[in-house]
Image (spheres, rainbow, N blue to C red):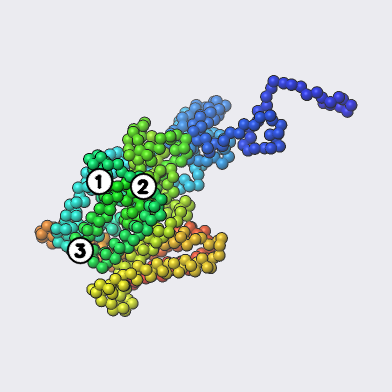
Amino acid sequence: ISRPGDPEPVPQQTAAKLVAIAERQLPAVARHFSETIKVPPLRVRKADLAAQVEYYTSLFCRAKGLDKPTLTPEALRRLQSYDFPNNIRELQNLVERAIVQSDQGSMLTEEIFWSAQGKQKRFRLNLLNAYPAFRRFLRSPWWPDRINYGFTAIAFPLIIAVLFLAPQTRDQNFALNFFWAWWWPLVLLAFPFVGRLWCAVCPFMIYGEITQKITTELLKRDLKPWPRQQAEKWGGWFLFGLFALIFLWEELWDLQNTAYLSAWLLIIITAGAMICSAIFERRFWCRYLCPIGGMNGLFAKLSMTELRAQQGTCSAECSTYQCYKGGPQKGEGLETAGCPLYSHPAQLEDNRDCVLCMTCLKACPHRSVAVNLRPPAIELWTTHRPRTYEVALLLLLLGGIFLHRLPEINQILGLNLDLSQFWPHLGLAIAALGVPAGVVLLTGAVVQFLNSPPKAKPFLQLAYGYLPLVLGGSLAHYLRLGLGEAGQILPVTMATFGLQGSTLPIVVAHPAVIAFLQGSTLVFGTLCTFVLTKKMSKQSWRSLLPQYLTSLGLAWAMAQIIVGL
């Protein structure tokens, strides 16, 4: 203690060093230290997490006299997927709380670290961890290779042959009955549950892959890399135009009840896949040009399942990118040719560019890939990026619902057009495709006018709110075929081969039941459109009133022509 009059203290040299640690930079304190070492935060040092957890576990258990638990690989992957806003202090607290919650001497499992989850990973259940048998099946040769090459590749040409050679109407051709009364309703019904799963077993690309093997192994030709810039710019518009032509062809030439024309439709799409596969590597057709794939990718956004990867695990442990590039077997990672759509699972933000072939799951040696159960359509109000051609395709599919009901529209409007004549039929078909899109575009302009920026969301983003209504209207249309004709498959199969099948069982729904289910589907789709639009826009109900009224008007019009209310 210095007293008045004492001389000033003389600074003394010492070998002792003072070390201080701070979570953030403190300029007022830092000036008293000769050296400053800046360590990157934990969110960019995911490779250090295992050692950090081991250190804090040992420290806490030694202090409390507890048996040291073991950290499971699943728990480490969950920690690696978290960004730790409060850095190592938060990690220490998480580890200590996990040890307290666990039984002494047991393992620290994924569930114990329940709070170590980023916003984008909330409300997700990894089905691969919950059901190990499901994981084993998806990693087995059965999915999808043995299904594709052991069944689909053989069944597809037989169906084409039946479409050409058998009777040409749906009531006498089981392949035509299967395509229109089974496949369309079931694939539309599957979108909210499994997304783009059909693309994993699609026969179009199976023959594309066979073409690639012939090109590379027999003809010894190298496949070209993708012209990504041009494909991203024009690919979506190509599939939009092709889908529009298919719609008009289907309506004007009655593809639903003409077997050989339905066969030509399948052959043309398969030919497109084979031609692109003979030129470009992997599934260029599936990602950019396939009209069915474009529709599947659009509706897959509504799915309650998703394939994603733990970004922290990928950045901390992976240096080979085998899930994306392909490569030899490494650890539990199997040998693969890489993702057929060139989509890295850690970079996926929506379901559009994932066909659920599980190549990445088989290739990953770090168990980073997850198949999650999630809230339906959550990507549309979180990570989604709108695209102009996708909105155009959505509006085209909306018009397709009305296109399929031209006789009812002709009757309700009292137009008295002779639809057996080509030009009146074509004119009404184009109007059916274009008028609903025009109504939606006009509504978008009204919403933008009434809600001045920055509150108003762009039309491209709000347009996706109609997606549940479009899916519901499409499903309601095909329910008539699915519930009224699909159950006649046994007698239809006998009739295909010229046999009598009148005594075979038939399972069809009563017209009143079909009408009830169609109406219920439209009501549910409309309600989902209301909720999705509200979640996406983050605006008041009043500001979105024009879009809600348009949705109600479109649903009412669909009910008039589909259900006959």
How far separated are the C-alphas under marks 1 and 3?
29 Å
Secondary structure beneath dot 1 equals: helix
Label pair 1/3, CB-CB below 8 angstroms: no
User: Residue 211: which numbered mark, if any?
Assistant: 1
The residue that mark 2 highlights is: 226
User: Residue 346 lies in what quarter of the image?
Assistant: top left
Query: Can residue 190 be seen by looking at this rendering?
Result: no
Q: What element carries label 3?
A: loop
Residue 520 picture location, percent across and down: 35, 64
Residue 475 position in % (x across, y down)? 32, 61
100 left or right of 169?
Answer: right
Name the residue type under label 1: Thr
C-alpha span from label 2 to label 3: 37 Å
Q: Are marks 2 and 1 in contact (CB under 8 Å)?
A: no
Which mark identifies residue 258?
A: 3
Residue extending furthest toward the left:
499
Q: Kindly report which numbered mark, 2 or 3, lies closer to the viewer in this rendering.
A: 2
| Residue type, numbered disc 3 | Thr
Q: Which of 113 and 342 is in front in this view?
A: 342
Residue shown at 37%/49% (left/top)? 227
Label 3 packing within 10 angstroms: few (<14), some (14-19), many (20+): some
Precedes in sequence: disc 2 or disc 3: 2
Rendered image: mark on residue 126: none
